[in-house]
Image: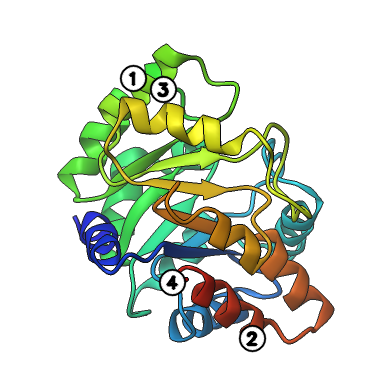
């Protein structure tokens, strides 16, 4: 799988995978895809694109706001997949969506259109491991990876089972609570990541609260990649110079 190849290539270079996030449809659908292209041109190794949803249980205020903007514009999963066809960003693309829109769309239709749109992976925060076998098998048949989430509160048996079913990477939620920029990494994060490492040799990507180059540098040697979401979306929303921010975050993956 292309995601696995990306992690292996960056690991050989002693470099963390940088996976910035955008909400599809914020501030418009066209602009969100253009922003993905800009991210790819300025250091992204994997792109994460969130499907707007009305009840995002894991999302903090910034991403909730971006989803609300997209939903007010009428952006839906069908629009996103159609807009992605024919686009090439130069690095792998992963979709993030809650489960209800995926079920409503239809599993086979969804995966067929994801593959046609060049999507390499899927993150579904509310897909329980106990319900995931069918999704994993169907996605695998389309050469699409499903990444599962672990949190600091995850018990050892859940960490072990997640390690067993994960293929390209494990998404480690850095803290309890919702997404959003934080001033510092959670003190218990190294211990949590070591628990995952003890159960799996799969790449581990850390998300939630990663918002500064020093956060990224602190994760070198502990993780294989970082997701930065709210910090970048906040900068775009304020009209700030976000491209330099992106470049600084990517530079921190190397040193």
Q: Are marks 1 and 2 in contact (CB under 8 Å)?
A: no
Q: Which residue is mark 4?
A: 254
What residue is shown at x 27% (from left), y 33% (from top)?
136
SS of the residue at dot 3? helix
SS of the residue at dot 4? loop
Q: Quadrant of residue 72?
A: bottom right
Which sits in the foreground, 49 or 180? 180
Q: Is residue 134 visible?
A: no
Q: Which residue is mark 2?
A: 244
Of label 2 and label 3, which has the lower sequence position? 3
Q: Are marks 4 and 1 in contact (CB under 8 Å)?
A: no
- The local crowd at label 1, few if under 14, some if 14 to 19, many if 20 or more residues have their Cα within 10 Å, is some
Q: CA distance from mark 2 to mark 4?
A: 16 Å
Q: CA distance from mark 3 to mark 1?
A: 6 Å
Which mark's residue is nearer the viewer, 4 or 1?
4
Q: Left of 151 or right of it: where is 130?
A: left
Which sits in the foreground, 202 or 41? 202
What residue is shown at x 79% (from left), y 55% (from top)?
183
Q: Quadrant of residue 213?
A: bottom right
């Amino acid at each position: 799988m292309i995601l696995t190849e990306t992690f292996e290539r960056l690991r050989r270079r002693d470099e963390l995978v940088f996976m910035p996030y955008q909400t599809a449809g914020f501030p418009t659908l066209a602009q969100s895809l253009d922003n993905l292209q800009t991210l790819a041109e300025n250091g992204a190794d994997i792109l994460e694109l969130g499907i707007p949803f009305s009840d995002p249980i894991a999302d903090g205020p910034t991403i909730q706001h971006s989803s609300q903007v997209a939903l007010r514009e009428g952006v839906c999963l069908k629009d996103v997949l159609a807009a992605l066809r024919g686009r090439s960003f130069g690095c792998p693309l992963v979709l993030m969506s809650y489960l209800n829109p995926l079920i409503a769309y239809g599993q086979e239709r969804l995966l067929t259109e994801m593959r046609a749109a060049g999507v390499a992976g899927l993150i579904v925060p509310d897909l329980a491991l106990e319900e995931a076998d069918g999704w994993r098998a169907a996605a695998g048949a389309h050469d699409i990876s499903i990444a599962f989430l672990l949190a600091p509160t995850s018990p050892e048996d859940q960490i072990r089972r997640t390690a067993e079913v994960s293929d390209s990477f494990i998404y480690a939620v850095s803290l309890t609570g919702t997404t959003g920029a934080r001033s510092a990494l959670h003190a218990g994060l190294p211990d949590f990541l070591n628990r995952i490492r003890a159960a799996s040799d799969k790449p581990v990507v850390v998300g939630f609260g990663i918002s500064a180059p020093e956060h990224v540098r602190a994760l070198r040697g502990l993780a294989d990649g970082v997701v930065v979401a709210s910090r970048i979306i906040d900068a775009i929303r304020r009209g700030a110079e976000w491209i330099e921010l992106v470049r600084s975050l990517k530079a921190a993956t190397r040193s």
